[in-house]
Image: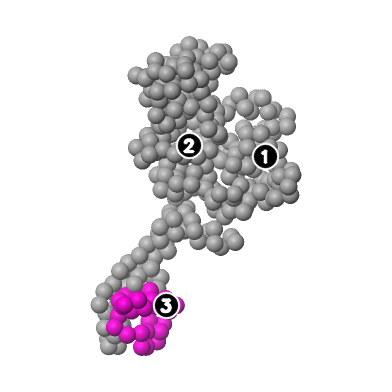
């Protein structure tokens, strides 16, 4: 199946000469929730603006729905909903009236407002002025406005930014509901690693304008699962290398800990037996799995 969005070896530099994207590529499958991670200044916002046609790639190929912004820009944008900057509203008007203005501009049926309000959970507060809304409610209203024309692709830049934990959960659950009920493909940038892991089906990690990972999020979690390390607390470091015969990491901070990568629990038991047999005192064993955050940091460091 052709990706709904495809960037192939895209480069972009601003007038000051700073190259923000350097032969960057990504492919967003139709129907996916595609997460986009990277540190500040890595090129996330620039990439989103290239996808939206707000910036033109200076090198490489950009296609959305199989077409180019240079030839089908209006047709492409008519199929996209977005929230890429701080949303603006008529604060003195009700949520319903704000949506009515959007509906009229798109010449949409009247019932689309009720459908959008129900989807984002604002039906009961539709008659309140937006000035009375919390930040989380405003984010949901902005999503309702973006969803009003029933877009095939929803592009979101940090939609949970500034929200409290409950607001973050509400946005996550809402995006999953939009994806599952409407079949909307979602392209979402974030700096919240835990949220990306819970929300997304696919992921791209960008650093210094280049992709350091791209693919189904399971590929990254499977890679994490294989990065397993065990720590033995021992009485002495004498003879450890000859006994275990593998790359070791030794930490001495009040106690002596020796760590190494392993694949099975049987391997840990065998190493413990070898140590004890050779007279090394073993006071404790601790298994350690690499987290998504640790994998993310390692990917960035490897790309420096």
Image location of residue 262, percent across then percent down? 38, 70
Spatial separation of the CA atoms under disc 2 and disc 1: 24 Å
Image quadrant in which you'd find residue 244: bottom left
Q: Residue at x 35, y 76 (%)?
A: 253
Q: Give the residue pinned by disc 1.
A: 62
Asked if 16 appears above or below 168 in the picture, the reply is: below
Asked if 303 appears above or below 211 in the picture, the reply is: below
Image quadrant in which you'd find residue 170: top left
The stretch drawn in magenta includes residue 235: yes
Q: Give the residue pinned by disc 3.
A: 248
Image location of residue 256, percent across then percent down? 33, 79
Spatial separation of the CA atoms under disc 3 and disc 2: 43 Å
10 Å crowding of disc 1: few (<14), some (14-19), many (20+) = many
Q: Residue at x 42, y 77 (%)?
A: 248
Element class at badge 3: loop
Q: Residue at x 53, y 38 (%)?
A: 157
- Count of all numbered marks drawn on residues in the image: 3
Image location of residue 175, percent across then percent down? 43, 34
Closest to the camera, between mark 3 and mark 2, is 2
10 Å crowding of disc 2: few (<14), some (14-19), many (20+) = many
Q: Report whether residue 194 is seen.
A: yes
Please report whichever mark, 1 or 3, sits nearer to the chain's N-terminal start: 1
Q: Report whether residue 60 is seen.
A: no
Split into 4 quadrants, where in the image is the N terminus?
Answer: top right
Spatial separation of the CA atoms under disc 1 and disc 3: 46 Å
10 Å crowding of disc 3: few (<14), some (14-19), many (20+) = some
The stretch drawn in magenta includes residue 123: no
Please report whichever mark, 3 or 2, sits nearer to the chain's N-terminal start: 2
Q: Are marks 3 and 2 in contact (CB under 8 Å)?
A: no
Residue 159 image label: 2
Q: Which residues are magenta?
A: 232-259
């Amino acid at each position: 199946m052709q990706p709904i969005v495809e960037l192939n070896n895209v480069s972009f530099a601003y007038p000051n000469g700073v190259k923000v994207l350097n032969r960057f590529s990504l492919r967003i499958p139709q129907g996916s929730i595609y997460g986009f991670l990277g540190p500040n200044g890595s090129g996330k916002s620039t990439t989103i603006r290239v996808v939206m046609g707000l910036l033109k790639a200076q090198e490489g190929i950009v296609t959305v729905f199989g077409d180019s912004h240079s030839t089908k820009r209006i047709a492409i944008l008519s199929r996209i909903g977005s929230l890429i900057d701080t949303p603006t509203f008529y604060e003195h008007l009700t949520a319903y009236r704000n949506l009515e203005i959007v509906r009229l501009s798109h010449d949409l049926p009247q019932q689309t407002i009720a459908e959008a309000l129900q989807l984002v959970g604002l039906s009961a507060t539709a008659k309140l002025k937006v000035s009375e809304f919390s930040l989380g409610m405003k984010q949901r209203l902005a999503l309702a406005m973006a969803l009003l024309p029933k877009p095939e692709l929803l592009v979101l830049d940090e939609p949970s930014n500034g929200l409290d934990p409950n607001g973050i959960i509400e946005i996550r659950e809402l995006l999953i509901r939009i994806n599952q009920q409407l079949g909307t493909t979602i392209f979402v940038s974030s700096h919240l690693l835990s949220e990306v892991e819970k929300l997304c089906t696919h992921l791209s990690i960008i650093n210094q304008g280049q992709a350091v990972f791209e693919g189904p999020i399971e590929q990254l979690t499977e890679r994490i699962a294989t990065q397993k390390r065990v720590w033995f607390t021992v009485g002495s470091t004498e003879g450890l290398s000859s006994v275990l015969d593998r790359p070791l990491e030794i930490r001495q901070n009040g106690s002596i800990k020796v760590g190494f990568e392993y694949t099975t629990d049987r391997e840990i038991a065998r190493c413990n037996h070898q140590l004890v047999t050779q007279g090394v005192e073993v006071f404790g064993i601790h298994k350690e799995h690499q987290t998504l955050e640790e994998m993310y940091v390692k990917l960035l460091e490897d790309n420096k």
